[in-house]
Image: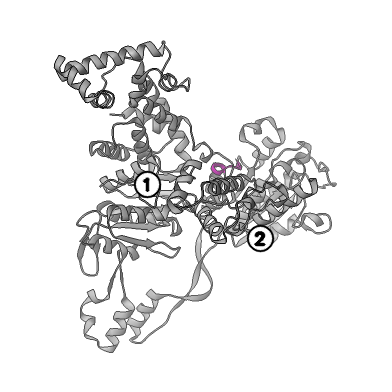
Amino acid sequence: MFLNFLDELRAAGIPASLKEHLMLLEALEREVIGKSPEEFYYLSRAVFVKDEGLLDRFDQVFNKVFKGILSEYGTQPVEIPSDWLKAVAEKFLTPEEMEAIKSLGSWEEIMDTLKKRLEEQQERHEGGSKWIGTGGTSPFGNNGYNPEGVRIGGESKHKRALKVWEKREFQNLDNTRELGTRNIKVALRRLRKFAREGAAEELDIKATIDGTARQGWLDIQMRPERRNAIKVLLFLDVGGSMDPFVKLVEELFSAATAEFKNLEFFYFHNCLYEGVWKDNRRRFSERTMTWELLHKFPHDYKVVFVGDAAMSPYEISHPGGSVEHFNEEAGAVWLQRVANTYPAAVWLNPTPEQHWTYSQSTKIIKDLMNDRMYPLTLDGLDEAMRELTRKH
Amino acid sequence: MRFQGTKSYVATDDLKVAVNAAVTLRRPLLVKGEPGTGKTVLAEEIAKALNAPLITWNIKSTTKAHQGLYEYDAVARLRDGQLGDERVHDIRNYIKKGKLWEAFESPQLPVLLIDEIDKADIEFPNDLLQELDRMSFDVYETQETVAAKDRPIVVITSNNEKELPDAFLRRCFFHYIKFPDRDTMQSIIDVHFPGIQKILVSKALDIFYDVREVPGLKKKPSTSELLDWLKLLLAEDMPLDVLQNKDPTKAIPPLHGALLKNEQDVMLFERLAFMARRQG
């Protein structure tokens, strides 16, 4: 039952397993929900989707798997559940009428007549077009003169249910969207390595008990607090083609400063050369020599470049290629030096990944970084952090 | 036992299905959503609706999984040992029951709320896997097994600060409380302020959703902030025409402190008002 649904979910990248599937079947067996597609949609969503980023994808899969089934539901003459008919009869026939009909025949006969009438009614209305899904208008809602059409609540409910997943309300929660500070922080948390360093200021209970038991008197032991020991060197491209991404980079920056205690950041323009700066207003007066950085920060620093890598290829490959000053050595040489000094390094690119291939300079930088260029989306950031935490 | 929302809590259809599935199958229900959309309140309301006691376990960054089961107070035993206290011979005197133990032993079927599970260490949910799956655990110190007579209803909330492990997620039902649309919001307000003027609410909602739409807000106001703000408006007896004032030079809504919780956001509004004044 619903095994192709499970397959489709997995194909769409939703990590559903047999466990969830059995859970769904168990819930159906225990009659957690009534027999409406809408409730089935809610239940299966609660079972299969465990991440709001996947909700939109789930809606699409659900639509794909059940669309055919649910829309055919109306176009072919199907068994109309008897309780619907009963409700219809009870609601719209006065007790006198019921009695009158009853005297004419059995309850079953009445049901049959009613059923036939309803089927006729349906066929007359549809005019060959599908009931549900495509047009967005229901034949039932529009036709004021047809009480039966309105009465069979089941269909209009289908319509509403279909809409719930067709609306795709969770579209903007998808993983590939741009990020906010909070999401960035979540992604950056991948980059954590706790270590006990520094002054001993926390009571080590286990060692204290151990020591006390061994000595016979109270023997207090202290130890340093656990801290995130990751050290990050952040290089940000500013100005020119980076202007459209200011807000995005600002968010990344504020998240990073909040997340890492050992964070050093520097600005550069387009490509890394012999000097970087910390304050954009004094970029020409207060430069730090890139050589100094390479000597000052140990090899275990993780290096993150943020830039769109969009420039003339000469700015990377040739000495004197910089647009701002005369550089003695080519940008490629400097990037190479950084990559050699710090084994853990990535380049985050705020331009969408599909545009990368159109820019010569992006390809060059990507090669210089040994392919470690990631888009500045939640997924990209996640991958980049994984790369940084890999053993080097 | 079916959860249908309560007098003081408006539950959407999808939420009801998720809660009922979790209650019937006795699997944990994981609830996520923007802060202030009523994740924690949900557990209280389920307890109220099912007439069950609520046991709350608030998770902090320092909380360890075993603290929910039990804690063995070795230091106290050590001290008693040195003082020659009689209690020292029975190890059970030094075992403190945790919230999970409490829930397992509860005479009446309880609702156990594990609040903000993402605050704890990344390994925390993994450490609770077996316990939540089998609803039993062993106490090593006394060699006894604590098992739940009746599987408690478990509600877990998360603010998404950390990713939860797959194995943990597989055992849960999941519900994402999305931000309520206008109609749902209206019924939430009706539930909280039954006597409030329709027109005041409608004006307040206009302003509220406008504020949420302002681009660049660091923190968008949520349901609980709206309710606080309405409470303030009522308490201050704010005349209706203040809310109706569409003058762009007064872009900051009255009593904005309840809606905007960030000085940068307030600055943003002041700047917008200033620009509107200059253009006018």
Say which of A60 and B24 sits in front. B24
| Circle 1 residue | B169
Against A8, residue B111 (above or below) is below
Question: Could you say where residue B28 lies in the image, as x and y percent from the top left?
Answer: 32, 50
Residue A86 location (% of width, % of height): 23, 25
Q: Which residues are magenta?
A: A372-380
Provide the chain ID for the residue under circle 2: A
* Amino acid type, residue under disc 1 in the picture: Leu
- Asked whether B259 or B171 is in front, the reply is B259
Q: Secondary structure at mark 2?
A: loop
Specify the amino acid type for callout 2. Phe
The quadrant of the rendering that contains the N terminus of chain A is: top left
Q: Chain of mark 1?
A: B
Q: Is residue B162 magenta?
A: no
Is mark 2 in CB contact (under 8 Å) with mark 1? no
Q: Name the one closer to the observer, A61 or B4.
A: B4
The Cα–Cα distance between marks 2 and 1, rounded to whole angstroms, is: 40 Å
| Label 2, residues with CA under 10 Å away: few <14, some 14-19, many ≥20 | some
Q: Residue at x 58, y 53 (%)?
A: B219
Whether A379 is among the magenta residues is yes
Secondary-structure class at tag 1: helix
Q: Which residue is found at the position 33% from the left and 52% from the top?
A: B46
- In the image, taking residue A109 as reference, residue A177 lies left or right, namely right
Which quadrant of the structure image shows residue A241? top right
Q: Residue at x 72, y 49 (%)?
A: B272
**Residue count near mark 1 (Cα–Cα under 10 Å), binned few <14, some 14–19, many ≥20:** many
Residue found farthest to the bottom: B83
- Res A392 seen here: no
Q: Which residue is mark 2?
A: A297
Q: Residue furthest front?
A: A96
